[in-house]
């Protein structure tokens, strides 16, 4: 399997622009997670989906952030409008529920976002 | 108080020695505990998981859990320069939950 795929790998944009990050989870995985990592705040969960349905979006910082999962093989995280404080590495991860012990989350390579 | 706390380091250990990484958590009801390794510029990867009090060994890695003290540790025996990375402790609150809470990570450097 190719693993979790994210695009773009790097994104540089100007404040106020819309940014769309993309993720393709591992085939067959039924959970998808979006994380943000910064030096100050570490790795934070933004939102996660189960079978394409958003389950917990309590980590989404504000209304400028939105995430969708239209099908089992694709998810987007959108920031509109973007701000310099959104600069971070955004990771997508996926996992497979196995009984009560859905454990290993497989992370994608991340998208490094810089908002000027 | 942070939910999951780690010493950010850097922790410097000579090659061949034992590296000891520590993590405390605040939610006494937490059930599952994980150690992820993250090389600079790369994504986190799971190296150990532990669910019961005591030790769990996998090769050169040993995870230790003490729920009474709300403490998790990772020991790396015979440390190698390739072990130099940031180690993230993660906690899952209850069985069946999907949400992981990560610590800030400890940066480990193994000196040849």
Image (cartoon, coloured by chain):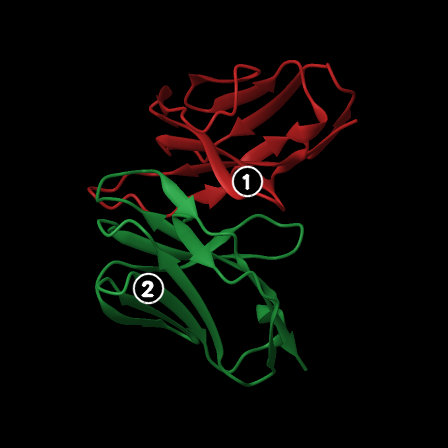
Task: Note the chain letter of the green one.
Answer: B
Task: Note the chain letter of the red one.
Answer: A
What residue do we see at 61% from left, 57% from top? B39
On the question of residue B19 being in view, the answer is: yes
Indicate whether A64 appears above or below A39.
above
Viewer-closest of A89 and B104 = B104
Q: Position of residue B112 (x, y in %)?
A: 68, 82
Q: Secondary structure at mark 2?
A: strand
- Chain ID at mark 1: A
Q: Position of residue A107 (x, y in %)?
A: 50, 43
- Chain ID at mark 2: B
Q: Quadrant of the C terminus of chain A?
A: top right
- Crowd band around label 1 with a 10 angstrom C-alpha radius: few (<14), some (14–19), many (20+): many
Q: Is residue A22 left or right of residue A103?
A: right
Which numbered tag is attached to residue A108? 1
Work out which residue is located at the far front of the displayed protein and give it.
B1
What residue do we see at 52% from left, 29% from top? A24
Report the Cα–Cα distance between label 1 and label 2: 29 Å
Q: Is residue B36 left or right of residue B3?
A: right
What residue do we see at 51% from left, 63% from top? B7
What residue do we see at 47% from left, 59% from top? B6
> Is circle 1 on the same chain as circle 2?
no
Query: Which residue is the site of mark 2?
Result: B71
Q: Classify residue A102 by image quadrant.
A: top left
């Amino acid at each position: 399997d190719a693993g979790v795929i994210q695009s773009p790998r790097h994104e540089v944009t100007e404040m106020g622009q819309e940014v769309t990050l993309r993720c393709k989870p591992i085939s067959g995985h039924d959970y998808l997670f979006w994380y943000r990592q910064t030096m100050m705040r570490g790795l934070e969960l933004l939102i996660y989906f189960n079978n394409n349905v958003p389950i917990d979006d309590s980590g989404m910082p504000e209304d400028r952030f939105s995430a969708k999962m239209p099908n089992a093989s694709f998810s987007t995280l959108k920031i509109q409008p973007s701000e310099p404080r959104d600069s971070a590495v955004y990771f997508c991860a996926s996992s497979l529920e196995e009984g009560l012990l859905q454990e290993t989350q497989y992370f994608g390579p991340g998208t490094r976002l810089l908002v000027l | 108080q942070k939910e999951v706390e780690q010493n950010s380091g850097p922790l410097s250990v000579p090659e061949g020695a034992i590296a000891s990484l520590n993590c405390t958590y605040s939610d006494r009801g937490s059930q599952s505990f994980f150690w992820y390794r993250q090389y600079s510029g790369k994504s986190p990867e799971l190296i150990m998981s532990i669910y019961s009090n005591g030790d769990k060994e996998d090769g050169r890695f040993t995870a230790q859990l003490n729920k009474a003290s709300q403490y998790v540790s990772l020991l790396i025996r015979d440390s190698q320069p390739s072990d130099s990375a940031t180690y993230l402790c993660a906690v899952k609150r209850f069985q069946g939950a999907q949400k992981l809470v990560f610590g800030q990570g400890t940066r480990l450097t193994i000196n040849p």
